[in-house]
Every structure is written in structure tokens, then in C-alpha cells.
Image: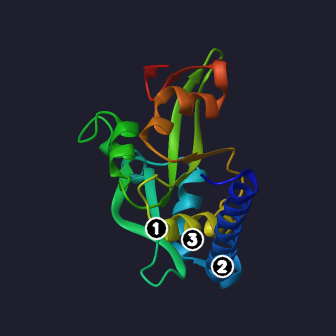
Amino acid sequence: MAGPEQVVQRNLSVGLKVYYTQVFYLTCFGTASGVQVADEVCRIFYDMKVRKCSTPEEIKKRKKAVIFCLSPDKKCIIVEEGKEILVGDVGVTVTDPFKHFVQMLPEKDCRYALYDASFETKESKKEELMFFLWAPEQAPLKSKMIYASSKDAIKKKFQGIKHECQANGPEDLNRACIAEKLGGSLVVAFEGSPV
């Protein structure tokens, strides 16, 4: 059986290894490494943020949700192909847009996302953008470190986002958690369903 000094020394040693591993990954993969944000990502954010007076056809093409990932070389944040929900899909091919959005997130890797949340408070109906960092427990440590350290690069491009959510599993993405992020007890409904 190890004595108290040996336990403290072993815990300190493990703690330093974890710390130095984190410093290594931040140094190698952090925003200082030059992670860029693709122009298409910025354009999509602008289109989602600015709601112009549009024709019904243009409204249907507006994005309700979109998922972003790192490029294969881990140097650029890009739009993940096929991972979007259009406003026109809601009620046609997608019955519950938030549930569909959560199902689009990978079980074993990290992602960034924008979601155009529709919710009701006791006073009014609102639509506001939410930024998500999805970092599930099953994701590789390297992926979690890269996404966490590159988050500032994408957030700098998304000026004016009021709501941010870091989710580590589906339990962090239930309606009650999202309502709390959007306004706490003032929120009475989210995506047409009571909270």
C-alpha cells in the first residue's frame, strides 16, 4: 500500500503530464497555429443573422441549422456537406427541427454549429441564433483539444451571437437546457413545444 507522500507525488506527476499534454496540443493546434474560417462559413452566418424582407421562396431557402467542421488538414473551419436544415424543410421533411439537428451531430467527433432558435417568452415570440460547440465524451482527446482551441477563430467571425452552448452529450441538448440558455424561466416554449 502506498503512503500519503507517494500518492501525492503520483497524483502530481499525472497532473503535470495532463497539463503538459494540454499545453502541447494548444501550442500545436490552437488559434496561434493559424486555423482559418472559410468565407462560406462567414457568408452563411451573415445570411442567418440578417433577416431581410424576402419572398416566400427565399425564406424557404434560408438555413435553420448548419454544422461546421475542420477541414481534413485541420487548418480551416468549413461547412460540413449535407449537414443543414432549411426553413422550407420544417413541417415538410423535418417535423422537429431541433431533434433533427441533434441527430445530425456525430456521436464520436466534435463540431461547431449555428441554430436559428424559435422560442416564446411570457411576453413575445423570438428568433435568435445560438452557437454550439459539440464535444462528446466519446470524441478523441486530440479532436476535443483542436476544436476547443480553435473556437475563438470562428467566434470572432460570428459577431453578435447572444447564446452559446457547449454540449458534451445528448443530455446537454434537451429542451430544458436550451431554454435555460435562451432566457431561463422566461422561456415558455421552444420550437413550438412547451418547455
Which colour assignment does the render follow?
Answer: rainbow
The crowding category of the residue bearing disc 1, from other C-alpha atoms within 10 Å (few below 14, some 14 to 19, many at least 20), is some
Three-letter residue code for mark 3: Ile
Kindly identify which residue carries mark 3.
Answer: 146
Task: Determine whether 27 is above or below 119 in the image.
Answer: below
* Residue in view at x 33 percent, y 46 percent: 103
Label 2: few (<14), some (14–19) or many (≥20) C-alpha neighbours in 10 Å? few
CA gap, disc 2 to disc 1? 22 Å
Q: Whole-percent x and y of residue 85?
A: 36, 50
Q: Are marks 2 and 1 in contact (CB under 8 Å)?
A: no
Q: Which element carries disc 1, helix, strand or loop? A: strand
Q: Amino acid at mark 1?
A: Cys
User: Identity of the amino acid at label 2?
Assistant: Phe
Which tag is nearer the camera, tag 2 or tag 3?
Answer: 2
As helix, strand or loop, the secondary structure at mark 3 comes to helix
Secondary structure of the residue carrying tag 2 is: helix
Q: Which residue appears at 59% of the width and 60% of the height?
A: 46
Q: Residue at x 47, y 64 (%)?
A: 68
Residue farthest to the top, as pictured = 122
Residue labelled with disc 2: 24
Residue nearer the viewer, 124 or 71: 71
Q: Which residue is mark 1?
A: 69
